[in-house]
Amino acid sequence: MPLPEHLGGFVATAVLMAVLPGPDFVLVTRNTARGGRRAGLGTAAGSVTGIAGWAVLATAGLAVLVSSHPEVLRVLQLAGAAYLTYLGLSAVLGLWRSRRARQAGAEAFDTVRDAGPGASRGGSPFLQGLLNNALNPKPLVFFVTVVPQFVTAPEAATAQTALLGAVSVAVVVCWWLVYVLGISTLAEFMRRRRVRQGIELTGGVALTAFGVALALAA
């Protein structure tokens, strides 16, 4: 199989797409603040699994299906918008309820609500990362629009698409390892209640905004 031309350019593009802040970035940061390194890596693992799934489907010819039936993309956009909005509003409402409970003197209740990833809504950290990508058209759009630009041998299109998909997944894995391991060193700081609540509120608002923007774009 001939290697795709400009492979270095594709790697640079994949790196840029990986580090660009989006719903994944918000989820990984929020869950790391909630549950530490394990929760952050779990969310990242779910994200990578979702991206790998899109890569496999793209190699199997999903790009052709989406090109022929654009309504598939619209359905994904709406489903992804609904899930992100749910996660965001759940975070904001959960924070509001915990503050009300604390003001009423229910410190024990507040501690339970803030305790680790098990208290999070929307599923486990892994499931959140997985669903965010499974219902997010961003990876699909990348594989449908960007990857084909780097496929240079029509007779080896499937093999080259698979290779580029594997490169994309490898880039995302490296990025999340560096990011999660980096921010988890700030665990002591992130465990402070005000810091954790600030991350929770910011993350909830950001996820809701992503969901609304995705719905409007559908």
Image (tube, grey):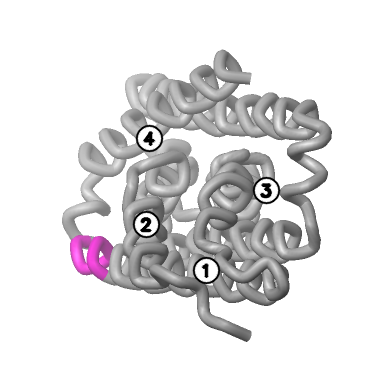
Q: Is residue 188 above or below residue 74?
A: below
Residue 147 colored magenta? no
Residue at the spot of label 2: 13
Residue 183 colored magenta? yes
Name which residue lies at 30% across and 70% down. Answer: 178
Which residue lies most toward the top here? Answer: 216
Name which residue lies at 56% across and 66% down. Answer: 152
Q: Secondary structure at mark 4?
A: helix
Circle 2 packing at 10 Å, graded few (<14), some (14-19), many (20+), is some
Q: CA distance from mark 4 to mark 2?
A: 26 Å
Q: CA distance from mark 1 to mark 2?
A: 13 Å
Circle 4 packing at 10 Å, graded few (<14), some (14-19), many (20+), is many
Q: CA distance from mark 1 to mark 3?
A: 14 Å
Q: What is the x, y in percent for residue 63?
A: 72, 49
Q: Amino acid at mark 4?
A: Gly
Q: Is residue 29 left or right of residue 207?
A: left
Number of the front mark, 1 or 4: 1
Q: Is residue 66 above or below residue 156?
A: above
Q: Which residues are magenta?
A: 182-186
Residue at the spot of label 4: 203
Q: Amino acid at mark 2?
A: Thr
**Residue 37 sits in which quadrant?**
bottom left
Residue placed most toward the observer, 125 or 175: 175
Q: Amino acid at mark 3?
A: Ala
Residue at the spot of label 3: 134
Mark 4 or mark 2: name the one nearer the start of the chain. 2
Q: Is residue 211 above or below residue 136?
A: above
The majority secondary structure of the magenta stretch comes to helix
Q: What is the x, y in percent for residue 134?
A: 67, 48
Circle 3 packing at 10 Å, graded few (<14), some (14-19), many (20+), is many
